[in-house]
Image (spheres, rainbow, N blue to C red):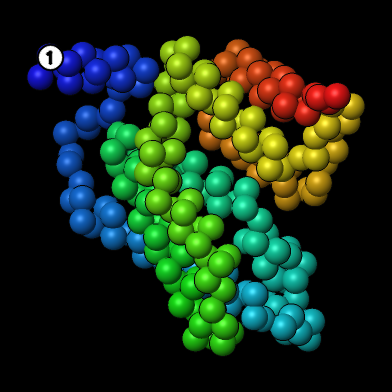
Amino acid sequence: MDLIKKCKDKLDGIRKPAHNGKQSNIVTDGGIFLLIGMLLGVFSKWLDCLGINDGVWWQRLLGMIDLGNLLSLFPVWLLIALAIAVYAGSPLKAALRVFLFFAGMCAAYHISSILIAGFNPMDYMMIWYGFTAISPLLAAVCWYAKGTSIPSLVITTLVLWNMMSCCFAIGFWYFDFRSVMDTLIFIGAAVILHVSPKNTAISLAGALALALLFRLPLG
Protein backbone atom coordinates (compact mmCIF):
# COMPACT_ATOMS: atom_id res chain seq x y z
CA MET A 1 0.00 0.00 0.00
CA ASP A 2 2.86 2.38 0.79
CA LEU A 3 4.35 1.73 -2.66
CA ILE A 4 1.02 2.46 -4.35
CA LYS A 5 0.65 5.67 -2.35
CA LYS A 6 4.19 6.75 -3.25
CA CYS A 7 3.52 6.09 -6.94
CA LYS A 8 0.27 8.04 -6.75
CA ASP A 9 2.00 10.94 -5.01
CA LYS A 10 4.70 10.96 -7.69
CA LEU A 11 2.12 11.00 -10.49
CA ASP A 12 0.06 13.67 -8.73
CA GLY A 13 3.23 15.74 -8.63
CA ILE A 14 3.31 15.67 -12.43
CA ARG A 15 -0.37 16.60 -12.79
CA LYS A 16 -3.05 16.26 -10.16
CA PRO A 17 -6.47 14.87 -11.20
CA ALA A 18 -9.34 17.32 -10.94
CA HIS A 19 -11.75 16.82 -8.06
CA ASN A 20 -14.70 19.15 -8.48
CA GLY A 21 -17.01 17.23 -6.16
CA LYS A 22 -19.19 16.07 -9.02
CA GLN A 23 -18.58 12.47 -10.04
CA SER A 24 -19.73 11.55 -13.55
CA ASN A 25 -21.29 8.17 -14.25
CA ILE A 26 -18.55 6.06 -15.82
CA VAL A 27 -21.03 4.18 -18.05
CA THR A 28 -22.63 7.40 -19.32
CA ASP A 29 -19.26 9.11 -19.68
CA GLY A 30 -17.78 6.22 -21.67
CA GLY A 31 -20.95 5.73 -23.70
CA ILE A 32 -20.83 9.32 -24.96
CA PHE A 33 -17.35 8.90 -26.43
CA LEU A 34 -18.22 5.47 -27.82
CA LEU A 35 -21.19 7.04 -29.61
CA ILE A 36 -19.11 9.97 -30.90
CA GLY A 37 -16.54 7.52 -32.28
CA MET A 38 -19.25 5.43 -33.97
CA LEU A 39 -20.86 8.48 -35.57
CA LEU A 40 -17.51 9.73 -36.88
CA GLY A 41 -16.65 6.25 -38.18
CA VAL A 42 -19.91 6.00 -40.14
CA PHE A 43 -19.58 9.62 -41.32
CA SER A 44 -16.01 9.04 -42.51
CA LYS A 45 -17.02 5.94 -44.50
CA TRP A 46 -20.01 7.77 -45.96
CA LEU A 47 -17.68 10.55 -47.17
CA ASP A 48 -15.41 7.91 -48.74
CA CYS A 49 -18.34 6.64 -50.80
CA LEU A 50 -19.88 10.03 -51.60
CA GLY A 51 -19.54 11.25 -55.18
CA ILE A 52 -19.36 15.03 -54.94
CA ASN A 53 -22.00 16.76 -57.09
CA ASP A 54 -21.11 20.44 -57.54
CA GLY A 55 -24.74 21.15 -58.37
CA VAL A 56 -25.74 20.41 -54.76
CA TRP A 57 -24.68 23.25 -52.47
CA TRP A 58 -23.81 21.18 -49.40
CA GLN A 59 -21.85 18.66 -51.46
CA ARG A 60 -20.00 21.52 -53.15
CA LEU A 61 -19.16 22.83 -49.68
CA LEU A 62 -17.83 19.42 -48.62
CA GLY A 63 -15.68 19.39 -51.74
CA MET A 64 -14.35 22.87 -51.05
CA ILE A 65 -13.20 22.04 -47.53
CA ASP A 66 -12.08 18.57 -48.69
CA LEU A 67 -13.56 16.98 -45.56
CA GLY A 68 -13.30 13.44 -46.95
CA ASN A 69 -9.53 13.69 -47.37
CA LEU A 70 -9.21 15.47 -44.02
CA LEU A 71 -10.75 12.52 -42.16
CA SER A 72 -8.47 10.14 -44.04
CA LEU A 73 -5.42 11.80 -42.46
CA PHE A 74 -3.94 9.94 -39.49
CA PRO A 75 -2.84 13.16 -37.72
CA VAL A 76 -6.41 14.46 -37.46
CA TRP A 77 -7.43 11.40 -35.43
CA LEU A 78 -4.36 11.86 -33.25
CA LEU A 79 -5.41 15.46 -32.68
CA ILE A 80 -8.94 14.43 -31.66
CA ALA A 81 -7.59 11.75 -29.32
CA LEU A 82 -5.10 14.23 -27.82
CA ALA A 83 -7.90 16.69 -27.07
CA ILE A 84 -10.05 13.97 -25.51
CA ALA A 85 -7.16 12.78 -23.33
CA VAL A 86 -5.76 16.12 -22.20
CA TYR A 87 -9.10 17.63 -21.21
CA ALA A 88 -10.27 14.58 -19.24
CA GLY A 89 -10.38 14.99 -15.47
CA SER A 90 -7.92 12.16 -14.76
CA PRO A 91 -5.59 9.73 -16.58
CA LEU A 92 -8.09 6.93 -16.00
CA LYS A 93 -10.87 8.92 -17.68
CA ALA A 94 -8.48 9.84 -20.49
CA ALA A 95 -7.65 6.15 -21.09
CA LEU A 96 -11.31 5.08 -21.02
CA ARG A 97 -12.59 7.88 -23.25
CA VAL A 98 -9.90 7.52 -25.91
CA PHE A 99 -10.19 3.73 -26.01
CA LEU A 100 -13.98 3.80 -26.39
CA PHE A 101 -13.74 6.58 -28.97
CA PHE A 102 -11.35 4.57 -31.16
CA ALA A 103 -13.21 1.30 -30.54
CA GLY A 104 -16.46 2.90 -31.69
CA MET A 105 -14.85 4.62 -34.66
CA CYS A 106 -13.01 1.53 -35.89
CA ALA A 107 -15.95 -0.85 -35.46
CA ALA A 108 -18.38 1.55 -37.14
CA TYR A 109 -16.00 2.26 -40.03
CA HIS A 110 -15.29 -1.45 -40.51
CA ILE A 111 -18.96 -2.49 -40.46
CA SER A 112 -19.90 0.42 -42.73
CA SER A 113 -17.22 -0.64 -45.22
CA ILE A 114 -18.80 -4.08 -45.39
CA LEU A 115 -22.43 -2.93 -45.50
CA ILE A 116 -22.11 0.27 -47.55
CA ALA A 117 -19.05 -0.24 -49.74
CA GLY A 118 -19.33 -4.02 -50.01
CA PHE A 119 -15.77 -4.96 -49.06
CA ASN A 120 -13.92 -6.01 -45.92
CA PRO A 121 -10.67 -4.03 -45.37
CA MET A 122 -9.43 -6.44 -42.69
CA ASP A 123 -5.69 -5.89 -43.19
CA TYR A 124 -6.09 -2.12 -43.02
CA MET A 125 -8.40 -2.29 -40.01
CA MET A 126 -6.01 -4.55 -38.08
CA ILE A 127 -3.58 -1.61 -37.97
CA TRP A 128 -6.29 0.55 -36.44
CA TYR A 129 -7.40 -2.18 -34.02
CA GLY A 130 -3.79 -2.54 -32.88
CA PHE A 131 -3.56 1.21 -32.31
CA THR A 132 -6.88 1.10 -30.43
CA ALA A 133 -5.50 -1.62 -28.12
CA ILE A 134 -2.58 0.57 -26.99
CA SER A 135 -4.53 3.85 -27.04
CA PRO A 136 -5.50 3.75 -23.32
CA LEU A 137 -1.84 3.72 -22.26
CA LEU A 138 -0.94 6.49 -24.71
CA ALA A 139 -3.93 8.55 -23.59
CA ALA A 140 -3.01 8.23 -19.91
CA VAL A 141 0.55 9.34 -20.65
CA CYS A 142 -0.65 12.27 -22.80
CA TRP A 143 -2.94 13.41 -19.98
CA TYR A 144 0.13 14.26 -17.91
CA ALA A 145 1.43 16.55 -20.68
CA LYS A 146 -0.86 19.35 -19.47
CA GLY A 147 1.01 19.69 -16.18
CA THR A 148 3.72 22.20 -15.31
CA SER A 149 6.45 19.77 -14.21
CA ILE A 150 9.55 18.66 -16.10
CA PRO A 151 8.04 15.23 -16.94
CA SER A 152 5.06 17.08 -18.45
CA LEU A 153 7.46 19.13 -20.56
CA VAL A 154 9.18 15.95 -21.75
CA ILE A 155 5.85 14.31 -22.66
CA THR A 156 4.72 17.45 -24.51
CA THR A 157 7.98 17.48 -26.46
CA LEU A 158 7.57 13.84 -27.46
CA VAL A 159 3.94 14.36 -28.51
CA LEU A 160 4.84 17.40 -30.62
CA TRP A 161 7.74 15.49 -32.16
CA ASN A 162 5.36 12.74 -33.19
CA MET A 163 2.85 15.25 -34.58
CA MET A 164 5.61 17.14 -36.36
CA SER A 165 6.83 13.92 -38.01
CA CYS A 166 3.26 13.17 -39.15
CA CYS A 167 2.41 16.66 -40.39
CA PHE A 168 5.62 17.80 -42.10
CA ALA A 169 8.22 16.34 -44.44
CA ILE A 170 11.46 16.61 -42.48
CA GLY A 171 14.99 15.69 -43.44
CA PHE A 172 18.33 16.67 -41.98
CA TRP A 173 18.71 19.34 -44.66
CA TYR A 174 15.10 20.31 -45.28
CA PHE A 175 11.75 21.08 -43.67
CA ASP A 176 8.71 21.05 -45.97
CA PHE A 177 5.02 21.82 -45.42
CA ARG A 178 2.84 18.98 -46.69
CA SER A 179 -0.48 20.83 -46.72
CA VAL A 180 -2.40 23.64 -45.06
CA MET A 181 -4.54 21.14 -43.13
CA ASP A 182 -1.49 19.27 -41.80
CA THR A 183 -0.05 22.58 -40.62
CA LEU A 184 -3.33 23.55 -38.92
CA ILE A 185 -3.48 20.14 -37.24
CA PHE A 186 0.00 20.63 -35.82
CA ILE A 187 -0.86 24.13 -34.62
CA GLY A 188 -3.99 22.68 -33.01
CA ALA A 189 -1.88 20.13 -31.12
CA ALA A 190 0.49 22.88 -29.90
CA VAL A 191 -2.49 24.96 -28.72
CA ILE A 192 -4.06 22.01 -26.88
CA LEU A 193 -0.78 21.29 -25.09
CA HIS A 194 0.00 24.94 -24.33
CA VAL A 195 0.68 25.61 -20.66
CA SER A 196 2.92 28.68 -20.87
CA PRO A 197 4.83 30.49 -23.65
CA LYS A 198 8.14 29.30 -22.19
CA ASN A 199 7.09 25.63 -22.01
CA THR A 200 5.63 25.72 -25.52
CA ALA A 201 8.80 27.31 -26.95
CA ILE A 202 11.02 24.69 -25.25
CA SER A 203 8.78 21.83 -26.39
CA LEU A 204 8.69 23.06 -30.00
CA ALA A 205 12.46 23.48 -30.07
CA GLY A 206 12.95 20.03 -28.54
CA ALA A 207 10.49 18.43 -30.98
CA LEU A 208 12.29 19.99 -33.95
CA ALA A 209 15.68 18.90 -32.61
CA LEU A 210 14.44 15.31 -32.23
CA ALA A 211 12.90 15.36 -35.71
CA LEU A 212 16.20 16.50 -37.23
CA LEU A 213 18.31 14.18 -35.07
CA PHE A 214 16.43 11.09 -36.24
CA ARG A 215 16.98 12.16 -39.85
CA LEU A 216 20.76 12.25 -39.50
CA PRO A 217 22.56 10.37 -42.29
CA LEU A 218 24.03 7.13 -40.94
CA GLY A 219 26.73 6.57 -43.47
187 versus 199 height, above or below:
below
Q: Residue at x 23, y 20 (%)?
A: 8
Q: Residues within 10 Å of mark 1 (few under 14, many from 20)?
A: few
Q: Is residue 161 left or right of residue 183?
A: left
Q: Is residue 105 left or right of residue 165?
A: left
Which of these two is toward me, 53 or 107? Answer: 107
Q: Is residue 35 left or right of residue 213?
A: left
User: Seen from this angle, which residue lies furthest left?
Assistant: 1
Q: Residue at x 49, y 86 (%)?
A: 115
User: Seen from this angle, which residue lies furthest front?
Assistant: 219
| Number of numbered discs on residues | 1
Q: In this view, does 134 lie to the left or right of 6?
A: right
Q: Where is residue 103 in the image (x, y as percent from the top left)?
A: 40, 60
Q: Position of residue 183 (x, y in %)?
A: 74, 42
Can residue 189 be spotted in the picture?
yes
Q: In which quarter of the image is the N terminus?
A: top left
Which of these two is toward me, 64 or 211? Answer: 211
Element class at badge 1 = helix
187 versus 97 height, above or below:
above
Q: Quadrant of the C terminus?
A: top right
Which of these two is toward me, 2 or 78? Answer: 2
23 versus 49 height, above or below:
above
Write down the quadrant of residue 70 in the picture: bottom right
210 versus 138 height, above or below:
above
Q: Which residue is drawn at 40% across and 51% down?
A: 133
Q: Residue at x 49, y 41 (%)?
A: 82
Q: Where is residue 106 in the image (x, y as percent from the top left)?
A: 46, 64
Task: Residue under label 1, please give it.
Answer: 2
Q: Where is residue 171 in the image (x, y as percent from the top left)?
A: 83, 32
Q: Which amino acid does label 1 sit on?
A: Asp
